[in-house]
Image (cartoon, rainbow, N blue to C red):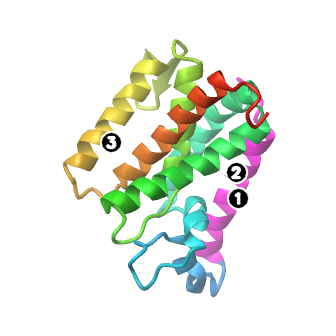
Amino acid sequence: MMRITDVVKNLIIINVIVFFAFQILPGARSLFQYFVLYDFSDPRFNPIQIVTHMFNHGNFNHLLFNMLGLFFIGPFLEQAIGSKRFLFLYLAAGLGGVVLSQLFGSGANGMLGASGCLLGVVVAFAMMFPNMEMMLMFIPIPIKAKYLVTAFVLYDLFSGIGRFNDGIAHFAHLGGALVGFLLVLAWRKYPDFLK
């Protein structure tokens, strides 16, 4: 197993601290609205939410699965592309999630979480290591990264277009995935970009 890298470690720490601060610190709930992204036309919208929502999670399972994905996939990618690029990818993917979710209105009740960031990381990983075999936690069958990630993206596309009312911001996932895809293409064409 690969050693956890610095940016991945710090991102996990920040996400865990933010989540548990809202759970246990008295008075922290009064700041919760600043860590949820509302539609730009919503009176509750504040520009700081564009970034802060990426570090908050709706419940423990949401936090756990996002951080496990980051823990297991992030270090491979961070070592391959470098810490600076990895942090840029993570944050840019989160912003890509904001753009698509705002364009397609999938965050009307507020959106939070690092899923858009994570999908950007996962897509970039699959592009760089397409034949690496991965396994889902509950399905212990090895699947090549390129196939598994394609299935994730198609699921989000199908669910987003179908407007399933499942509480998941599918277009945020797709925005993150798109940014991950475009950044890897850019780094292949311009190897010194953000080195």
Question: Which marked residue is nearer to the observer: mark 3 or mark 2?
Answer: 3
- Residue closer to the observer: 108 or 47: 47
Percent x, y of residue 89: 63, 42
Marked residue nearer the N-terminal end (3 or 2): 2
For label 1, the SS is: helix
For mark 2, what is the residue?
A: 11
Question: Can residue 44 be seen from the camera position used here?
Answer: yes
- The amino acid type of the residue labelled 2 equals Leu
Percent x, y of residue 119: 50, 40
* CB-based contact (under 8 Å), mark 2 and mark 1: yes
For mark 1, what is the residue?
A: 14
Percent x, y of residue 116: 49, 49
Q: Is residue 21 above or below residue 79?
A: below
Tell me the tag on residue 106.
none
Give the prevailing secondary structure in the magenta stretch: helix
Question: Can residue 64 be seen from the camera position used here?
Answer: no
Percent x, y of residue 189: 63, 23
Q: Is residue 12 magenta?
A: yes
For mark 3, what is the residue?
A: 156
Q: Estimate the spatial distance between the alpha carbons at disc 3 and disc 2, rounded to whole Å.
A: 24 Å
* CB-based contact (under 8 Å), mark 3 and mark 2: no
What residue appears at the point 72 percent right and 33 percent down from the top-left corner?
78
For label 2, the SS is: helix
- Segment colored magenta: 1-24
Q: Estimate the spatial distance between the alpha carbons at disc 2 and disc 1, rounded to whole Å.
A: 5 Å
